[in-house]
Image (cartoon, rainbow, N blue to C red):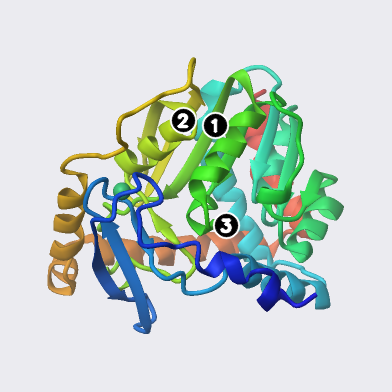
């Protein structure tokens, strides 16, 4: 299959109108990615949605290439990465704990190495997952006996009203049509179900200003723009969480009771606020603040913790079993 032809339409998906509010009032916000190479990032002046225009790569072909690479060599993550992902899985569980007091049907979109899905399964939930990377998906299936669909979320098949909870952690910003993705996830939710979306927060200033824009992140959201897009997809915002450093935004959505109609999807003032934050986040201000030094110290402690924990474990699964043992005992 010639991917370059099959996917040629996707590259032009980033049109000159805003994918959230349809406005044509768009202006450049940045012209460099975190590696310092050209990446044109624009902002819609009517709603504040930020995206790469044009897309720096054909999204599906990009992940399909990764997928092919993974197919050639069987994927085996290093113990320290499994340990790190296991810790992230525990914090994700903490975030959704109020939703899952009793056993639930749960879909995790983009399971990666399977650490979060495995934790949720071990806690007694009926877990399904989607993962486009064949290497990761096969690894997660074999190690943790997970029920996975291998492929892109856009092609995945589930019946309407299937899940109590759907989680999509750091995936939406990579997709070429996040409005369509949100609407698809909404259709798979049960009427009283909850969709949990976590994305990097465009208002964050914890990272180096040079690292704000990334080729892999086609879209950048704040709470207002993500909520508005979800609303257009037939969802309503229940609540949100912000990580301690402000870098990650987690939003909980339900199905809207009735279709929301709006005369427009604009968000007055949002673009101006985001522009202020992004343009004021200069290297001088960043390195004059405590943030980069705290970040460095946290990394050092993390590496020491990882070294200690991974030194004694016999394999990746038993590493997670040890890490999860406290929480599994408490249920
Ligand atoms: Zn817009």
Viewer-side label of 3, 2: 2
Rendered position, 287 above or below 312: below
Query: Label 3, label 2: how many angstroms apart (C-alpha)?
Result: 24 Å
- At 23% across and 47% down in the image, what residue appears? 46
Rendered position, 101 above or below 181: above
Query: Label 3, label 1: how many angstroms apart (C-alpha)?
Result: 24 Å
In the rendered structure, the answer to whether residue 311 lies left or right of residue 239 reads: right
- At 36% across and 82% down in the image, what residue appears? 38
Tell me whether circle 3 and circle 2 mark residues in contact (CB < 8 Å): no
In the rendered structure, the answer to whether residue 153 lies left or right of residue 75 reads: left
Query: Label 2, label 1: how many angstroms apart (C-alpha)?
Result: 6 Å
Marks counted in the figure total 3
Q: Position of residue 79 (x, y in %)?
A: 68, 64
Q: Position of residue 235 (x, y in %)?
A: 48, 28
Q: Report if residue 206 is visible in the image.
A: no
Reading the image, the residue beneath label 2 is 252
- Disc 2, SS: strand
How crowded pointer 3 is (Cα within 10 Å; few <14, some 14-19, many 20+) is rated as some
In the rendered structure, the answer to whether residue 151 lies left or right of residue 308 reads: right
- Disc 3, SS: helix
Tell me whether circle 2 and circle 1 mark residues in contact (CB < 8 Å): yes
Quadrant of the image occupied by residue 17: bottom left
Give the number of the disc on residue 84: 3
- Residue that lies at the very extreme toward the bottom in this rendered image: 37
The tag earlier along the polypeptide, 2 or 1, is 1
Residue sitting nearer the eye, 232 or 175? 232
- Disc 1, SS: strand
Give the number of the disc on residue 195: 1
């Amino acid at each position: 299959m010639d991917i370059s032809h099959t996917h040629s339409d996707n590259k032009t998906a980033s049109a000159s109108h805003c994918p959230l509010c349809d406005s044509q009032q768009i202006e450049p916000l940045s012209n460099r990615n975190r590696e310092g190479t050209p990446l044109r990032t624009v902002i819609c002046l009517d709603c504040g949605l930020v995206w790469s225009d044009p897309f720096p790569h054909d999204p599906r072909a990009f992940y399909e290439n990764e997928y092919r690479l993974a197919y050639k060599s069987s994927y085996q993550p290093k113990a320290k990465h499994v340990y790190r992902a296991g810790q992230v899985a525990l914090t994700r569980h903490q975030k959704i704990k109020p939703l899952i007091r009793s056993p639930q049907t749960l879909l995790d979109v983009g399971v990666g190495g399977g650490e979060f899905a495995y934790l949720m399964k071990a806690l007694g939930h009926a877990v399904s997952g989607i993962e486009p990377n064949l290497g990761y998906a096969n690894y997660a299936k074999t190690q943790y006996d997970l029920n996975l669909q291998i492929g892109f979320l856009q092609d995945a098949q589930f019946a309407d009203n299937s899940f109590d909870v759907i989680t999509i952690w750091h995936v939406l910003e990579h997709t070429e049509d996040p409005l369509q993705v949100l609407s698809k996830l909404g259709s798979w939710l049960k009427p009283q179900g909850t969709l949990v979306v976590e994305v990097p927060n465009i208002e964050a200033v914890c990272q180096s200003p040079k690292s704000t824009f990334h080729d892999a992140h086609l879209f950048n959201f704040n709470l207002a723009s993500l909520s508005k897009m979800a609303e257009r997809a037939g969802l309503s915002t229940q609540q949100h969480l912000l990580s301690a450093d402000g870098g990650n935004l987690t939003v909980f959505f339900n199905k809207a009771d009735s279709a929301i109609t709006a005369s427009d999807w604009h968000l007055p003032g949002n673009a101006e606020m985001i522009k202020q934050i992004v343009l004021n986040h200069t290297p001088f201000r960043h390195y004059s603040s405590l943030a980069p030094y705290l970040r460095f110290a946290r990394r050092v402690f993390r590496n020491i913790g990882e070294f200690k924990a991974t030194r004694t474990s016999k394999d990746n699964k038993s590493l997670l079993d040890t890490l999860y043992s406290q929480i599994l005992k408490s249920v």
